[in-house]
Image (cartoon, rainbow, N blue to C red):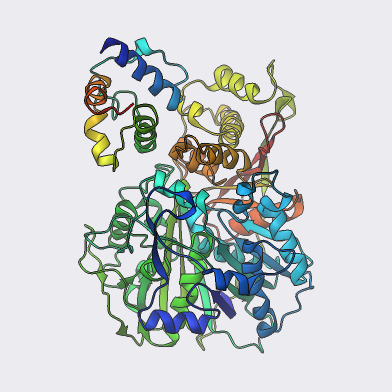
Amino acid sequence: MEELIQELKEHIIEVLNLEDMTPADIEDDAPLFGEGLGLDSIDALELIVMMEKEYGIKLKSPAEGKEIFKSVHVMAQYVNEHRTK
Amino acid sequence: MVRVIADNIISPMGMSTEQNYLAVKAGQSALRRYEQHWGLPDAFTASLFTDEQNAAMHLDGFTRFEALVMRCVQPLLATAGIDVASDRVVFILATTKANIEQLQRGNEPTSDIVPGEAAQKIARALGFTTMPIVVCNACISGVAAIVLAQQLLEAGTYDTAVVCGADVQDKFTVSGFQSLKAVAEDACRPFDIERLGLNLGEGAAAMVLQREGVGADKEASCCIEAGAVRNDAFHLSSPSKTGEGARLALQAIHATELASELAFINAHGTATMFNDQMESIAIERAGLQSVPVNALKGTFGHTMGAAGILETVISIAALHDHTILGSRGFEELGVSGHIRLSNRHEATDKRRFVKMISGFGGGNAAISVSLPSTLNHKPSALNPQPSTLRHHLKVTEGGISLDGQTLPLQSRGRELLVEAYKTFIGDYPKFYKMDGLSRLGFVAAELLLQAERGEHLTGTPEARNDRAIILFNNTSSIMADRHYWATVSDLEASFPSPAHFVYTLPNIVAGELAIRHQYRGETSFYILPRRDETLMAQVVNAAMADGSASSALTGWIDYPCDEHFEAELWIIEN
C-alpha cells in the first residue's frame, strides 16, 4: 500500500504538472480538490485518464471520480480493489 | 447597426437557408448514432455529412473544410451583388479547428493546417483582395465574427463584410469532447432534466453584412442592432456559475430594455449540464425570464465555428416566418434559472430576437437582431478616439524586453519562459499546466501589467470590466494541437488528454489572462495569414469605438514551436 501511495503521488505530480511539488508535499489523507492541492475539474478528468492508462480502471463520469479522488489514501484503496493491470 | 443583405447555410440537412429552415420547421434532424466510428471506442451521436454529400461538395485542390466554405459563400456573392475585389470588402472566417483533419494524414501536413493559410486560399479563390481575418474564439466564434464585422463596418473600416462560420468533425474533436465527458451517446436534449451532453455537428453558414447607407438599393433581410463579447474570468472549460460573462454580454446589447419586444432568445443550449444551467441563470439575472427561449442543437448538433452564424440565420428565417421554433430534444425543464422553453413551434408577431452563445476560454457573446424598420436610426460612430500606447513588451525565444530595456535572463527557447516566470512572477503554479502559447502570453502580459501597476503604484491587480484582450497570431494553437493529437493517435495506448485538448484553441490564452487579471471585457483571438500592423490597429480601434472598452491589452502572440516564438504586447488607452 505504501508503495502504491508513493506511485500515485508521482503519477499525480506528473500528469497534473505540479512542477514545484514532490511526493512528500502531498499528505496521504489531505483532500486533493478544493482547498488541498487546488485542483480543478480539468485535473479531475486528467486523473480519470490516468486511472485507465495506469491501472485499467474505467470511470464513466467526473461524479464517480469525485468520491475516489478524495485523497491519495482513498485512491490507493480503490486502485487496490479495482485494478486490472 | 448593420444590415444583413444575404445569407446561406450548408448542413447535412440541406444546401440552402431555405432547405435548412424547412427541415427545422418539419422537426427533422441529421443526428445519427455512430459506433466504433473513426476508431473511437465509445459511441457518439453527431450530425455529419454523408459520403454522398461529401463527394458532391468536393472541389479539386481544396480540403473538405475549404470546399464547404467555398460552397457556402460562393452563391451568396452573386445574390448580394457585391464587388468582391473591392478594398472596401472584408472576408471574415469563423472556425475552431479548420483543416485539423490534415493532422491525421500521418506525414507532415500541408501549410493550410494553419487556419490563416486556409482562409487566404479560400479568399483568393473567391476573388477577395483584402486580407481575410479568422475568428478563433472557440464556440462563440460565429457570433464573435458577426460582432467583429459590426465593429469594423460601424467604424467605417469597410463597407461590406462577408462572414462565414464553418467546421467539420473528425477523430480529433470528437475524442477531445469525449475526454471532457461532454459528449452524449444519443441525441442531445437542450435544457432538459435528462440531458447528458452535447452532439457535434458539421456545417457552414454565411452572411453578407453592410453598413447603413452603403448599397442601400439592396433590400436588407434583417439588421444586427448591437453585439458584444464578454468574458467570465472564471474557468477555461466551465462556465461561470452565476452566468457573469453571459449576463454582461446581454446587458451590453441592452437586452433587458428590449425584453417586451423580443420574440425569443436563441440560446447556445449545448445540452451539457453546466452550459444550459449557466444560460438559464444569466437569462434570469438579465431580467429576460418572460422571453421564450429556444435552442437548435437538438437539430444540428454543435457545429462549433458555424454555430453562431447558422443559428442566427435560422432565427432570422423564423422571425420572417413569425415563428418561435421549438427546441428539438427538450421535454422537461432541468435548469434552476426561470426560463420559458417549448419543444413546439409558436407564433409571434414580434420583430426582434437575441442570439447568445458561450464557450471555452470563458467567452460569451450576444447580438440583437431585428427585422428592418422604417425608423431612422442614429448614425453609427464613425470616428474612433485616437488611442494612446502605454508600455510595450516583446518576448522572443532569445530574450525579453520591456519598454525597450532587455531583462537579465540567461535561458533561451521554452526554458526562457520558465526562468522569467520563476524570476519575476512565481506565485501562479497554474503556469506549469499551460501550453507554450499560454505560457508565452502569461509571461508577456504579467510583465507588462507589472510595469503598469508600478506606474500607478496600486500594487495588486484590480478586476475590471472595461479592459478588452484582443490578440492576433498566425499559427493558431498548432503546438497544442500536435501534443493533443499525440495522445490520441498512439495506436498502442490511445488516451486522449483532456488537459491538452483544452489548449487546442488559441483563445484559451486570452481566457488565462482574463482569469488571472479578472478582466471581464471583450476577449478575442484573431488569426491572420501574416502579421499586419495596420489591420490589427483597425480591429482594436473598431472594438474600442463603442466606448464599452476604455483600454485594451493587445498584440501579436505566436508559438509555432518551442524553439521559435514571439509575443509583442502593449496596452492601449482611449
At x 30%, y 67%, the residue is B288
Residue at horizontal 38%, vertical 87%? B322
Percent of width and height locating residue B232: 41, 48
Q: Is residue A1 above or below residue B133?
A: above
Viewer-nearest residue: B563 or B245? B563
From this view, report whether residue A25 is shown above or below residue B402. above
Quarter occupied by residue B93: bottom right
> Percent position (x, y) of residue B494?
47, 38
Quarter location, residue B185 = bottom left
Q: Quadrant of the N terminus of chain B?
A: bottom right
On the image, the x and y values in percent for residue B85 come to: 79, 73
Number of callouts in the render? Answer: 0
Q: Nearer the viewer, residue B181 or B522?
A: B181
Does the rendering let one see residue B386? Answer: no
Considering depth in this image, is B265 or A60 the residue closer to the camera?
A60
Is B52 drawn above or below residue A30 in the view shown? below
Q: As drawn, is B308 to the left or to the right of B527?
A: left
For the point 49% across and 58% down, which residue is it?
B140
Position of residue B471 measured from the top left corner of the image (x, y, whole percent):
62, 46
In the foreground, B227 or B490: B490
Q: Answer yes or no: is residue A37 visible.
A: yes
